Image (cartoon, rainbow, N blue to C red):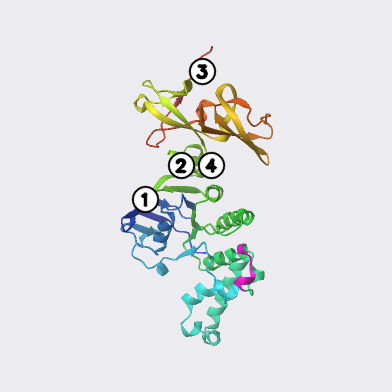
Amino acid sequence: MTTPQSLDLLGIGKSFGNDEVLKEINLSIRPGEFLSLVGMSGCGKSTLLRIIAGLEAPDRGTVSIGGNDVTDTDPSDRNLAMVFQSYALYPHMSVRQNIATPLRMRRLTFSARLPLIGRLLAPAETMKAIDAAVEQAAETLHIAHLLDRKPAQLSGGQRQRVALARALVRSPAAFLMDEPLSNLDAKLRAHMREELASLHRRLGATFIYVTHDQIEAMTMSDRIALMSEGRIEQLGTPDELYRSPATLTVARFIGTPSINLLPVEINGQGRVSAFGQNLQIQAAAKDAGPSTLGIRAEDLRHAADGFAVRVVRSETHGADRFVTTHLLADETVRLTMRQSSDERLAVEAAGTMRLGFAPEQAHLFGTDGERRKVSVLERVAA
């Protein structure tokens, strides 16, 4: 395996006609890191990956691999392996031949790659090395028993492993993956997430992974770059994006179920209130005006002095239950509470109760969508 390389993007911009799809992207990816580019469709993540691969040229900015500027370097000379959403396997070739193709293209002359007579013309030592590399890659991905099958004889998960083996056999400086699990069913996708994470740990290689699925990004990544409208909204660990979202966009995208959002008002002294109820949250006086408070489902709880809500439905998800409610003061505001098995209380549809939260667990965002700094006020005794 080639020593993992760092990748650095500086000031990357890209437009298609009048549509600016990437806006001054700056990103440093560490050697051996698993970094996910995540965001809604159209945010620019796949375009950014293609620029890294050399399949698209940036309008401005530079791409560096291992400290070397490769902005104008051909894709074949960047030593990067790309795995696509469509497996892109040759249907007439066996698994063995599919995996060997990148090595044959690089190590053999044109005549040695010809069908039938090619193997007779190819140097024996080169063919032996290619066969050994193919078998090693197949063993790594647990598909050695499939080497003589054709792609049509394989399941979706097996085809994806073949595509990964074909990338692995090249010993690339980094793996680029563009939504490689999107075509798999939910159960197989979960299994392949474990396989990819395990493969990354074994190889210690640099992985750059594009997905719109936040669960994939959260479960596999060392860091996540969440993109929106051609920009990186936040770069950090999965826990940082979940617990300290930098913007309202990040807060909305990360987390299942989605974060609860409550309209609040900040007065001239920085005190935060919602629907006439003062909260134990102090913001800066300069942030006075309407704002949005975000509360994760697991941070909501029954509270005698909380907001009055009406229960809409209750859903059981294994050990957890999600209780969806509407605020009585404003039926357009929905609050979803997660209850674990040891804290469940009886709730009935159309019933009412009161929900509160610990102020230190709330996230405050201004009208510009940026996170606001807050402090927790001491509760005043009645």
Q: Which circle's residue, 1 or 2, is located before the other in the chain?
A: 1
Rendered image quadrant of residue 192:
bottom right
Residue hosting label 3:
379
Stretch of the chain drawn in magenta: 150-156
Q: Say which of 204 and 28 sits in front.
A: 28
Q: Secondary structure at mark 3?
A: loop
Residue 27 position within the rendered picture, expressed as x and y whole percent measured from the top left:
39, 51
Gap between marks 2 and 3 measured at Cα:
30 Å
> Earlier along the polypeptide chain: callout 4 or callout 3?
4
Q: Amino acid at mark 3?
A: Arg
Location of mark 1 (residue): 26
Task: Tell me what residue is drawn at x 46 percent, y 39 percent.
Answer: 245
Left/right placement of residue 320 relative to residue 63 reads: right
**Which residue is label 4 attached to?**
255
For badge 2, the amino acid type reads Val
Q: Which secondary structure, mark 2?
A: helix
Q: Quadrant of the C terminus?
A: top right
Can residue 67 be seen?
no
Question: Is residue 151 highlighted in magenta?
Answer: yes
Q: Is residue 26 magenta?
A: no
Foreground disc of the pair 1, 2: 2
